[in-house]
Image (cartoon, rainbow, N blue to C red):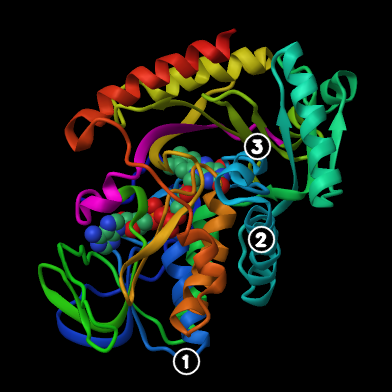
């Protein structure tokens, strides 16, 4: 059976990429990377550019995880917000993290240009409020970003202007950021993979790592084993993120894989699609259980929403998301949903990224908490820097304390379902 979900709009409409062989037998590389999403591929590319030999193992196909399913919104900063980061790591490191996130946005655009990645990148993002009380929250955020972080690409959009851009009764005001934007995430992932392969990275698909032997000494090799082979390498990067499962229990305890869903309408035509978001920005609302949407290059509405903290549960996502779309845009009552798919978002307990080491030469990246489209790109570069001997920037992140999710491995889902009910209630107030 094909691993390519036919209900995923991106898989269904992107020209099929060249397949990569399965790992067979034993091979050696300077670096072994587990996971063929944007994190793993960005690290692979940056490492190969520095002269490392790299073998990348992907359990299914490139972009099987969030990188091939995402809403594609490229958003500034961190899900935790700067104020919370300042409390966790102090003002100086929060500022360093901010600068790195902005560098990530620039790096993403540079990679698109440098490697001619055709991924429908569009600048512009709006974070919108749904209640009167959100207006002051958004105003404070704009003021704080401008004043404390010299971030001047954001501006407040009042109710009338917002309604002229997004003709929906639902939104009260918003922040527009000309530096954020959106792209087709699967095409971006494949573009990075092509660039990495050209730089010499050996990519293996259908190569699920079932066991890791991580060397306790920096001078020894580690090994990653699949059912049909082994990679031995001095350095390892674990970039399996929300799909890593229990391969590394200490990472699983610090991550909640949250099921979320996206629907794509039928092609609406340029005029009708343009009228829904006249400036073609990506839009996300301010709720905890948020709606997020954007126009596709072929003039559909892509609309994400509804989360499940108890895993991807079987439900009629096309019907449920269709109802959510009509709540925002009643004018789309007759628009058919052509695709609907789900995936797992990688959420950390404090919603700051979770990076670190499991052994002197074994690194991991996870927990981008809904900002992974940008942060995974720069995270890969930071890992390459660290493996090459400059770990200062990586260690700004590895110092962030992360608690375990409550309830232990077996009980944390029920605990989270309860927590989510509380957040949903809060959205309603
Ligand atoms: C529906 C959805 C919507 C989203 N929307 C947005 C958005 O609009 N903006 C945003 O910034 N973020 C969004 N995200 C989150 C974002 O997609 C992720 O943070 C990002 O793609 C993470 O990239 P990654 O490379 O770290 O992980 P992934 O893309 O998940 O890649 C991990 C890869 O590792 C592989 N793997 C796992 N275990 C193993 C193993 N043992 N052996 C070999 N391979 C393994 C998996 O098969 C997978 O391909 C969304 C996510 C989802 C699911």
Task: State how far apart marks 3 and 2 are (Cα).
Answer: 30 Å
Mark sitting earlier along the chain (1/2): 1
Q: Is residue 267 magenta?
A: yes
> Is label 3 or label 2 in front?
2
- In front here: 142 or 46? 142
In this view, which residue lies farthest toward the left? 227
Look at the picture and state if 206 lies above or below 415: below
- Quadrant occupied by the C terminus: top right
What segment is highlighted magenta in the picture?
244-269
Indicate left or right for 333 with 260 as reference: right
Q: Secondary structure at mark 3?
A: strand
Residue located farthest toward the bottom when viewing the structure as drawn = 51
Q: CA distance from mark 1 to mark 2?
A: 27 Å
Which of labels 1 and 3 is toward the front?
1
Tell me which residue sits at (72%, 51%) in the image.
Answer: 122
Which residue lies under the disc numbered 2?
A: 96
Confirm whether the magenta stretch covers residue 104: no
Q: Which residue is mark 1?
A: 51
Q: Which label belongs to residue 294?
A: 3
- Residue 158 vertical placement versus 46 (above, below): above
Q: Residue at x 86, y 48 (%)?
A: 152
* Count of marks, rendered view: 3
Does residue 169 appear in the picture of this structure? no
């Amino acid at each position: 059976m094909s691993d390519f979900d036919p209900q995923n709009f991106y898989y269904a409409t992107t020209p099929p990429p060249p397949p990569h062989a399965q790992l067979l037998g034993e091979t050696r590389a300077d670096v072994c990377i587990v996971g063929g999403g944007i994190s793993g591929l960005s690290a692979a590319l940056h490492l190969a550019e520095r002269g490392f030999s790299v073998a990348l193992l992907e359990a299914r196909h490139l972009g099987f995880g969030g990188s091939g399913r995402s809403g594609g919104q490229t958003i500034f900063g961190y899900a935790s917000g700067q104020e919370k980061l300042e409390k966790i790591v102090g003002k100086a490191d929060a500022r360093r993290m901010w600068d790195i996130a902005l560098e990530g946005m620039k790096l993403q655009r540079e990679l698109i240009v440098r490697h001619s990645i055709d991924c429908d990148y569009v600048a512009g993002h709006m974070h919108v409020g749904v209640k009167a009380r959100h207006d002051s929250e958004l105003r404070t955020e704009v003021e704080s970003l401008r004043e404390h972080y010299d971030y001047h690409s954001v501006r407040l959009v009042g109710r009338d202007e917002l309604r002229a851009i997004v003709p929906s009764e639902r939104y009260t005001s918003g922040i527009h950021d000309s530096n954020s934007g959106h792209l087709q995430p699967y095409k971006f992932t494949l573009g990075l993979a092509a660039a990495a392969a050209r730089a010499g990275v050996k990519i293996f698909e259908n190569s699920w790592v079932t066991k890791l032997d991580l060397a306790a000494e920096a001078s020894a090799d580690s090994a990653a084993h699949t059912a049909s082979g082994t990679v031995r390498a001095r350095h390892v990067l674990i970039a399996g993120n929300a799909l890593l499962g229990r391969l590394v229990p200490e990472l699983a305890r610090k991550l909640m894989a949250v099921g979320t869903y996206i629907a794509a309408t039928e092609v609406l035509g340029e005029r009708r699609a343009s009228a829904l978001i006249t400036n073609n920005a990506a839009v996300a609302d301010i709720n905890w259980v948020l709606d997020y949407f954007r126009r596709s290059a072929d003039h559909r509405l892509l609309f994400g929403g509804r989360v499940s903290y108890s895993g991807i549960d079987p439900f009629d996502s096309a019907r449920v998301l269709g109802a959510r779309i009509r709540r925002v845009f009643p004018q789309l009552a007759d628009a058919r949903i052509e695709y609907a798919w789900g995936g797992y978002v990688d959420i950390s307990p404090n919603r700051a990224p979770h990076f670190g080491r499991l052994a002197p030469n074994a690194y991991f990246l996870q927990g981008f908490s809904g900002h992974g489209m940008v942060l995974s790109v720069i995270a890969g570069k930071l890992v390459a820097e660290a493996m090459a001997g400059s770990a200062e920037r990586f260690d700004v992140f590895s110092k962030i304390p992360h608690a375990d999710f409550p309830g232990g491995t077996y009980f944390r889902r029920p605990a989270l379902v309860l927590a989510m009910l509380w957040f949903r209630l809060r959205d309603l107030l």
